[in-house]
Image: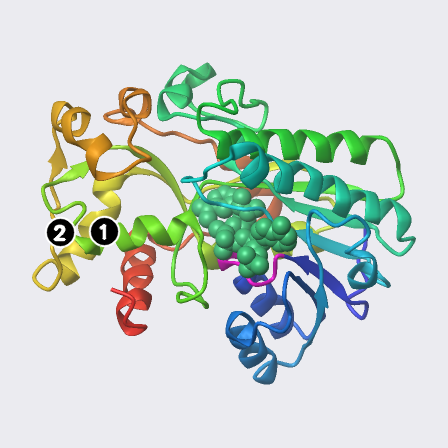
Amino acid sequence: MEIDKSKPVLVTGATGFVAGWIVKKLLDEGLTVHAAVRNPDNKEKIKHLDELAANAPGSIKYFKSDLLEKGSYADAMEGCELVFHTASPFVLDVKDPQKDLIDPAVKGTENVLEQANHTSSVKRVVLTSSCAAIYTDTVDTEKAPGGRITEEIWNNTASLDYQPYSYSKTLAENKAWEIAKAQDRWDLVVINPSFVMGPALNPKTTTSESYRVLKQMGSGAMKMGIPNIGFGVIDVRDLAEAHFKAGFTPSAHGRNIISGHNTNLVEMVKPIHAKYGKQYPMSARALPKWMVWTFGPMLDKALERKYISRNVNHKFTADNSKAVKELGLQFRPLDQTMVESFDALVENKII
Ligand code: NDP
């Protein structure tokens, strides 16, 4: 599926942490970006994108679009051969999981992909799904065949009541495949990133869960020690490259796990501690599981006991070999990603 680079490319949720670096890559490559955002009049949220466009060969045009408004991506998609659908809420602490997570994820995916069915120029949709559509808890990766998750596996443990964000990503990706398979004019390539770290282009405005966890690393929440939770990590800049390659590599297909490092929260904090340990209240030691069990739920709503038992002291392992081979990916070292993530918080006086 050859994509004509002279045609505009749509990025949904262009204000997001992940989308920012995708937009940058497209602009640097000289492309015209159709940036679909909820509120193009919110200058604070698009300032970084304007600055990127001013310093790159490509250009950007904004469109007002909402995942929950039918037909609201029509103008933004007009004339595009390639669509990057990244928009989806990534927040764990929600009041109403159905309304706050599932509806925008699933109905939004339906809205964008049905629009692709109505827009004759579209040849490929690249969907930002997640490893959360593959597993819920780290223990799931240990129990997977060979002790590692692969593109073959689908999440069957998340629900509306337990880890609804993971449930939202699972349902949304499933819906995307259903719509894609019912036609043959455009193809679907799915990106399944693990936890995204790295410097945000918009550290002040993103509400991404990635940034909530980063802020916790310096806020004192982990000064007693770190829950040893297994994580996969991908640098946001490497993830943007993966999206770009998924868009423009004709043979790209199917699901693609994009994860640079099989690691854990302790290893993620260590390089930040080495640079900032004297300035910020943080520790580089793992907290014993019984302490996480006792105090975790008081410190952080996300640390409910079921989550603790299934994630603390469990090892995360993902098989990233498909995307490495087929998309030709390389990954930044974990230490660099983590330190530069925190640098962005410090430089922007967020922490
Ligand atoms: P952000 O919160 O920074 O970005 C989410 C984007 O979705 C924002 O642009 C937001 O727009 C948009 N959005 C949310 N609700 C709506 C809506 N109703 N209508 C239109 N747009 C909406 O998060 P991330 O950049 O981290 O996440 C981007 C994508 O990457 C998501 O699909 C997420 O699931 C996926 N992902 C993220 C991972 C991570 O670790 N960060 C890991 C794996 C996958 P607005 O600015 O207006 O709020």
Magenta residues (range): 13-18
Along the viewing direction, whichever of 179 and 189 lies nearer the viewer: 179
**Residue at 13% in and 33% down:** 287
The residue tagged with tag 2: helix, strand or loop? loop
Residue lying farthest to the bottom in this orientation: 54
Residue 240: tell me if it is visible.
Answer: no
Disc 2 vs disc 1: Cβ atoms closer than 8 Å?
A: yes
**Residue at 49% in and 45% down:** 90
- Please state which amino acid type lies under the numbered disc 1: Met
Q: Is residue 138 above or below residue 255?
A: above
Instruction: Give the quarter of the image for residue 29.
Output: bottom right
The residue tagged with tag 1: helix, strand or loop? helix
Q: Residues within 10 Å of mark 1 (few under 14, many from 20)?
A: many
Q: Is residue 94 above or below residue 4?
A: above
Residue hosting label 1: 217
The verdict on residue 263 being magenta is no
Q: Is residue 15 left or right of residue 137?
A: right
Along the viewing direction, whichever of 321 and 344 lies nearer the viewer: 344
**Residue at 27% in and 32% down:** 229
Q: Residues within 10 Å of mark 2 (few under 14, many from 20)?
A: many
Rendered image coloring scheme: rainbow
Instruction: Give the quarter of the image for residue 240.
Output: bottom right
